[in-house]
Image (cartoon, grey):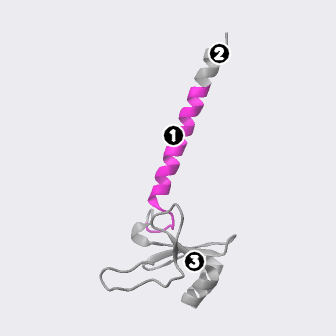
Amino acid sequence: MRECPNCGYKDPPYWRNVRFRIFTSCCSLEDFAIINPVLALKISKEIDIIEKPYIYHLVKKANIVQRIHIDDSMDGKSWREPEQEKHYKFKAQGQQTLMMLSSQLKKDKTP
């Protein structure tokens, strides 16, 4: 449960932390309809919604609503975390390095 240090507002207990993500929280679509019925109808049609101070994203396969604070998102427009982009960049660099090393090994093995 998250609490605002300035005003003392506490999130409803429906929101849970997302595993392996620092800034993202989630709840089921049914629980989200209890918290905010109007936004639940909108998100079922549009998938991504910016409703200050959060960006909401619907994971349709699991019927889960994820949210991230606008200040914590990658660019203030998408629901992705900045760390994910860094991870993908390093993953791509690692794959390129592995491909380069494997091609060098193949060249060394050919007589």
- Identify the amino acid type marked 3: Cys
Reading the image, the residue beneath label 1 is 93
- Identify the amino acid type marked 2: Lys
Kindly identify the residue that appears in the image at 46 percent across and 76 percent down. 54
When asked about the image quadrant of residue 47, the answer is bottom right
Magenta segment, which residues? 76-102
Reading the image, the residue beneath label 2 is 109
Along the line of sight, the residue nearer the viewer: 67 or 49: 67
The residue mark sitting in front, 3 or 1, is 3
Q: CA distance from mark 1 to mark 2?
A: 25 Å
The residue mark sitting in front, 2 or 3, is 3
When asked about the image quadrant of residue 41, the answer is bottom right
Q: Are marks 3 and 1 in contact (CB under 8 Å)?
A: no
- Identify the amino acid type marked 1: Gln
Secondary structure at badge 3 equals strand
**Which of the marked residues, 2 or 3, is nearer the chain's N terminus?**
3
When asked about the image quadrant of residue 59, the answer is bottom right
Give the x, y percent position of residue 84: 50, 56
Reading the image, the residue beneath label 3 is 27
Q: CA distance from mark 2 to mark 3?
A: 54 Å
Q: In the drawing, does residue 65 fall left or right of residue 24?
A: right
Q: In the drawing, does residue 109 fall left or right of residue 71?
A: right
